[in-house]
Amino acid sequence: MDGCPSGLEISEQKIQLELDRRRPGQSKITTQRKESDKVRILSGVFEGKTLGTPISLIVDNVDAISKSYEDIKDTYRPGHADFTYDAKYGRRDHRGGGRSSNRETVGRVAAGAIAKKILSLEGIATHGFVRQVGDIVAENVDFQEIENNIVRCPDKEKAAQMIELIDKVRKEGDSIGGTVEVVSTGLPAGLGNPVFNKMDADLAGALMSLGGIRGFEVGLGFKVSGMKGSESNDLMYKDANGNLRFKTNNAGGLLGGITNGEDLVVRIAIKPTSSISKTQHTVDKSGNPKELRVKGRHDPCLCPRAVPIAEAMVNLVLVDHLLQSKLARI
């Protein structure tokens, strides 16, 4: 990480709290790999505080079983980036997917923990949760409930249904997709840029850079395509403290690429995990037909572990814009 201000109190323990939320082997509905994901700070921090110099972190991968991937050495997994990596580079490391693997996100979450600390000093908090799995949609949002269930759903009743569905498809050797929502509170108005590097454009780029993401939306998102302006516009008023506010938050906290002071609300659509143990028809590198049953330990649903990852990416974008905003006016 570069650009972190000097004097920020940070420790391996604080970063570890976020990595523990992401790590494999948390429950029956996640991959059964037993990665400890222990982080070590190599540079940029001295006596518990940042130096203002680049921060280097390392997390060792300790539970890799490379032999599980021998069957796909020359065979392409349907829905996976195996083929496109070969098309781009001409060769690939088949032992786990390389940079197309979710293992890559450990660095994002570690960096996001530091961004989260900076934002907290400004009263900004980010809450991610699973909004939907398959056709089950959370209706009630209680931030206190999110970490009380293994699917990270803010609706206790819907969480139980989601867990049952994920466990069912897991036993069938299949996978299921869903939606993760991220809400950031305490944001001031004025963060973001009006043309290039709009806040929503940067958020889209950050979240769509994650593996398995197939859609991004802000506020009402695609629902506005069927609405009238009189229905989607957020009307303004002055609150009891004299602050300008909005009666609704259909815009998701953003207007013209800039925060308007309301909660930031974004959502990502996550595809079903492509590596499944059900038999699928595919081809090898020479185009020969193959039947494939993927071995190894894969998430039957990416959503629960995607929550801290999505939070991290939102926080990284927010902290960049927050630091930039301090230079916007004298």
Image (cartoon, rainbow, N blue to C red):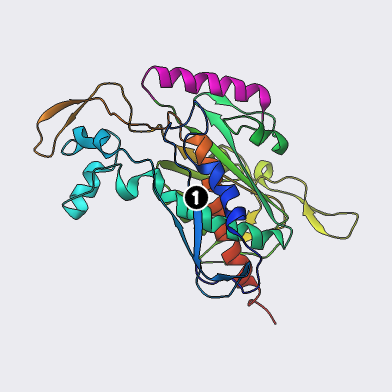
> In the rendered picture of this protein, how many numbered marks are placed on residues?
1
| 71 versus 220 height, above or below | above
| Residue farthest toward the right in the current orientation of the protein | 240
The residue that appears at 33% across and 46% down in the rendered structure is 100
The picture places residue 220, in percent across and down from the top left corner, at 60, 42
* Residue 132, image quadrant: top right
* Residue 181, image quadrant: top right
Q: Is residue 168 magenta?
A: yes
144 with respect to 80 (left or right): right
Q: Which residue occupies the foreground of this view, 190 or 89? A: 89
Q: Which residue occupies the foreground of this view, 8 or 314? A: 8
Main SS, magenta residues: helix
| Residue farthest toward the bottom in the current orientation of the protein | 330
SS category of the residue bearing label 1? loop
The residue that appears at 71% across and 48% down in the rendered structure is 234
The picture places residue 77, in percent across and down from the top left corner, at 25, 34
Q: Is residue 125 magenta?
A: no
The picture places residue 211, in percent across and down from the top left corner, at 40, 45
Callout 1 environment at 10 Å: few (<14), some (14 to 19), or many (20+)? some
Quadrant containing the C terminus in the rendered view:
bottom right
Magenta range is 155-174
Disc 1 residue type? Answer: Lys
The picture places residue 243, in percent across and down from the top left corner, at 83, 59
| 175 versus 222 height, above or below | above
Visible residue check, residue 203: no
Disc 1: which residue: 38
288 with respect to 248 (left or right): left
